[in-house]
Amino acid sequence: MAETQVHAAHHAPSQGFIRKYVFSVDHKIIGIQYLTLSMVSAFIGMALSWAMRIHLAYPDFRIPILGWLSPNGAPNGLMTPEYYLSLMTMHGTIMAFFVLTAAPFAGFGNFVLPIQVGAADMAFPRLNMSSFWVTFVGFLLAAATFFIPDGPPLSGWTAYAPLSAVGSVAGPGQGLGQTLWVLSIAMFCVASLMGALNFIVTTLDMRTKGLTLSRLPLSTWAWFIDAWVSLLAFAVLLPCGLLLALDRLGGTSFFIPGGLVFNDQLQPHSGGSPLLFQHLFWFFGHPEVYIIILPAFGIVSHIFPTFIRKPLVGGWKVITFAEIAVGTLSFVVWGHHMFVSGMSPFMAMVFSVPTLFITIPSVIAVLVWVFSLYGANIRFDTPMLYSLGFVSLFITGGIGGFFLAQPSTDSYLHATSFVVGHFHFTMGLSAIFATFAGFYYWYPKIFGRTMNEKLGKLHFWLSFVGVYCVFITLHLTGFAGSVRRYSAFVDDFMIPLMPAQRFMTISALLLGAAQFIFLFNAIWSRFKGPKSSDNPWGATTLEWATTSPPPFDNFGGRQLTVYHGPMEYDDEASVMQTSPEASIAGT
Amino acid sequence: MATTVYEPPQVERHLPYYSGKGGGENRAPAGGDLHAVEDRPLDPAQTGIRVALGAITMSFAALTSAMIVRQGTALDWRHMTLPSVLYLNTIALLVSSITLEVSRRRVTDYARGVQTQISIPMLWLLATLTLGLLFVVGQSVAWLKLRAEGLYLASNPNSSFFYLLTGVHATHVLGGLLALVYVISKLRRAVLRRSTFAAAAQYWHFMGALWLYLLLLLWAKL
């Protein structure tokens, strides 16, 4: 037997409910906490998008709960244009940070990564616990903006200065609401830095015997690369937030130019550069979209071989080096978000070139997934359906990227709903689909029970069709010139597009409703789902070499030895990474 | 009271490639003969501190680029003279790195049995702590001096960047002081890991190097 008895964990099992389930240092509990927080955040973000979409399509429709939430922002349930922007800001903030960054990386990464490397826990369990709770405080600060008289900020998830920097004179939500927002994001930065550090050290130092880098599961590879990108990007957003906070609270002029008048009031600042804010923000912001999508790459690349019963084309190297290339190039393309910012046109050209280059490793990854399907005996279980859905959405969104990478076409499309459709496909829904793939895939490991497969497939098809109905239409309205960030199109040239707006709204409501099937399935299966075996998918990596759910120290005191790569499949046959049997796929 | 300094297992490092416990050639052969498997020393503390220093470097690089861009577009950039106490503070911080290194070597000597008095490394550690505190106090003196000259955080972009960079650096130094207090408490309670000490020392030395860089930047740009 390829294992030895070792001293179990480097910290003792926690006793008592609070230490065991609330302030837990167990990476599995922390992973579940992140996933739960993300799920709550996702439903809040979705509700906000519903409110926005209803208002866009039916501007006179009253939403009573909004009137209760903000008597000023939505008097009698009818939202003001400013409150629309507040909802948009919080939708973007909650989704980008607390769902898309948190779930596929911190959520699954926390639960799965230490087990996949054969460790008893993360390298720094207490730091890990701190990461979650600092994230949680950041979430509370963001959520608190809904309950203050001023309401949430309206400067968008990008919080462009000087709008975000001058304070309450800039409009509703720009006082205390924006300050809480900055604090919330600063907390999220700190938490992400701590989390990234933990992921990197755990991957480097905690791997079990024989688990070389070339034998790492592809999901662990992606989390590892992602942790580096996260570490370097959030380390820039944090000082950016500090400068913004100082402009707001300390009277400095980092981002606020002189002679600026807001609501007829001359601002007491001079010499600041709004472009500086955009450079700092997007230096983080563009890697951020890869921080979101790289774990999705990893999850899907990890799931694919299990359900196609063969290794990915090119083995671990092609997909992993593509991810490394994407992660590296993500730091030199930020200027493509600023083509219409007033930046030098020469700089636009400079940023356009690497933006087109970054499509190369992205396309390589897509080709790996697509070519790997050739001749495969595909098992269409729900995790695989969602993985295929991810590939589809990523390709569709990626094609839109070619239009936006060109400064000439971006000048027209930049402020239209084309961009909204593009990024929802590429990083939003793609990452959500990969998260669903991961959820259906690892659910039996996390809870020891299996989710209902029929409900899972129903959830997939409704989501898949719903996503295309909403977000392809956004592309089309964008081509037609439909401006983004407008709260209503009641008296201008966009009136002819109202039927399309209504179609998108109805589709979005149905798409959202379909998510309750998932919610029901997840909760019902937790208590009533059939008990799962330890390795229900016939997979090969270490998380499937332990019980479902795993014990406190993951392997019951065993230290495993790894002999193979993670893609030892040959149709029905497979070899566990811990099995000393001869390789069948040469990984 | 006897003090134990846990040494990492001594492993011959002859492999050309080494990365983590499972890395390099540290793998089991296909036959499953575990005799061929070598244990590697785990050292998450040192890896962790190096990664953290990478993030800190990135943050200060961002602040530096912000300063250069802000200066490049500014019509309100006013030259200012750095308070001379900064140079004394620099000496204190650099000397503290030397005292810390001496302490680290004395701890190693103690662990090897060459040195019998634990009070010797402890004294050097306390000297480091004192010099570190002197540095932070000295930085506060510099802030008070500028304040007395009427230069506040928001007075002009130069003073803004001065307070910002020195403040963020001093906050990091305070973190280093906390790490030193942690090391001292572990040494007193006889449970200090050498890797913990090494990680704290790396952080402290980095703070010294970072301050030299910041001083040069402030001197050149302000």
Image (tube, coloured by chain):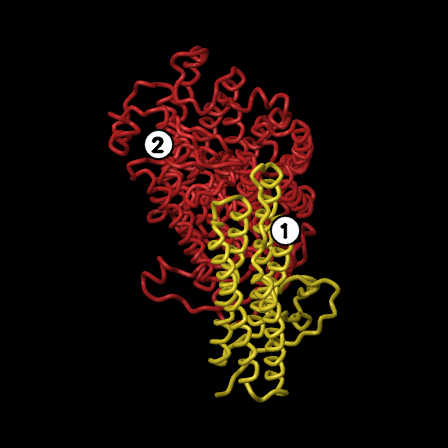
Q: Residue at x 63, y 63 (%)?
A: B20
Q: Tell me the chain of label 1.
A: A
Q: In this view, does A540 lie above or below A78?
A: below
Give the position of the N terminus of chain A as an image quadrant: bottom right
Q: In this figure, which residue is indicated by the disc labeled 2?
A: A172
Chain painted yellow: B
Gap between marks 2 and 1 measured at Cα: 58 Å
Quarter residue B97 falls in:
bottom right
Place of residue B130 in the rendered image (x, y in percent of width and height, measured from the top left) = 51, 73
Q: Is residue B125 left or right of residue A12?
A: right
Circle 2 chain = A
Of residues B164 and B193, which is closer to you in this image?
B164
**Kind of residue indicated by mark 2:** Pro
Q: In which quarter of the image is residue A24?
A: bottom left
- Crowd tier of the residue under label 1, counting other residues whose Cα lies within 10 Å: few below 14, some 14–19, many 20 or above: many
Residue A404 location (% of width, % of height): 60, 26
Task: Choose between B207 and A290: the one closer to the eye.
Answer: B207
Write the residue at 65% across / 66% down.
B32
Q: Which of marks 2 and 1 is nearer the N terminus?
A: 2
Q: Which mark is residue A350?
A: none
Residue type at mark 1: give it: Glu
Mark in front: 2 vs 1:
2
Depth check, front residue: A366 or A532: A366
Residue B67 visible (yes or no): yes
Q: Residue at x 43, y 60 (%)?
A: A26
- Residue where numbered disc 1 is placed: A568
According to the colouring, which chain is red? A
Asked whether the residues under the numbered discs 2 and 1 touch, taking CB atoms below 8 Å apart as contact, a structural biologist would say no
Q: Is residue B37 left or right of residue A241?
A: right
Where disc 2 sits, the SS reads loop
Q: Are tags 2 and 1 found on a single chain?
A: yes
Question: 10 Å neighbourhood of mark 2: few (<14), some, or many (≥20)?
Answer: many
